Amino acid sequence: MKRAELAHVLRAASDITRELEFLVVGSAAILGTYDDRRLPEAATRSREGDITPYRIQDREIIDRIEIYLGEGSRFGTTYGYFADAVDLVTSKSPAGWEQRLVRFSPPDANGVVGYCLEPHDCVAAKLGAGRDKDYEFAEALLRAGLIKQDTLLARVRSLPRDTGLLLGDIRRAERWVEMYGKPAPPKPTTVYAQVSFTARPGAVARRAHARAHGEPGTLCGRVGGRAGTYALTDPPREIGASLCETCRRSFEARRAAGVA
């Protein structure tokens, strides 16, 4: 959505509701601060403007916006963009968002005002929803330098915990913002000890035995040690029923030979 399109949605919403002030949330709220020509493509990809009357929450008015301007309406079909009528209950924004609203009232809005979420509040609220497309939106704005990482992290941490947002989604968002721009941690290197099978002539050593035979949490899945060590007998107290049949036979053979 572009600025001119958001202005059109606000004008149309005013025409059918007789309201002059609307709250703008969702990705369209970023247009209150930045002209669409400055925004990356991922930040203007959405075709919907999430709006609601600002001064009064009336279910009938909200439904009217959805019916006449929503997705699938004649308005949406004609212009290719539409309004998504929301209410303040579904607006789950960081604490203090009301004091940071950005006034949007371009000349072509005919006096209608859209109060848009401040960019960091907008992005934090979207990350709290936990959808992949919202992470793409946030990454595009961070990469373009249009929002600050430390401010965004503070806003994510101030998301309300009692409005239906999942705590797991909030924690995921916190972790993502904390790690943004940092190099990915190295993948752990797993070294499998060689296991000597005395049941076969020549004590043939086989690598990666745990990968072939092990189960999570069993001795067969133990890692570590250097080449040539015997993972199955170090320490002996770990030998037990958790061994696979192949390892059990090998261990019994080693013990009978006096080397276990």
Image: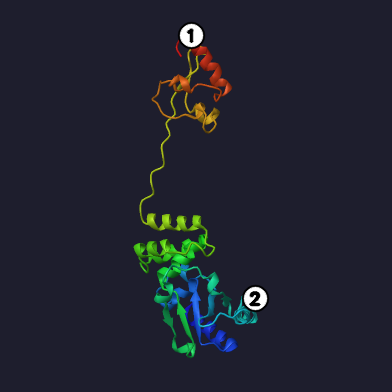
User: Is any atom of residue 150 visible in this view?
Assistant: yes
Mark pair 1, 2: CA separation = 79 Å
Judging depth in this view, the residue of 124 and 39 nearest the camera is 124
Residue placed under numbered mark 1 in the picture: 257
Give whichever of discs 1 and 2 has the lower sequence position. 2
Which quadrant of the figure has residue 228? top left
Judging depth in this view, the residue of 92 and 145 nearest the camera is 92
Left or right, 139 with reference to 129: left
Q: Which mark is residue 248?
A: none
Residue 183 location in percent, x, y? Answer: 36, 51
Left or right, 226 with reference to 57: left
Of badges 1 and 2, the one in the foreground is 1
Residue 169 location in percent, x, y? Answer: 50, 57
Query: What residue is at 49 percent from the left and 90 percent from the top?
Result: 110
Residue 246 location in percent, x, y? Answer: 56, 21
- In this figure, which colouring scheme has been used for the structure? rainbow
User: Is any atom of residue 34 visible in this view?
Assistant: no
Badge 1: residue crowd in 10 Å (few <14, some 14–19, many ≥20):
few
Residue placed under numbered mark 2 in the picture: 72
Name the outermost residue toward the top.
257
The answer to whether 93 is drawn above or below residue 74 in the figure is above
Name the amino acid, label 2.
Gly
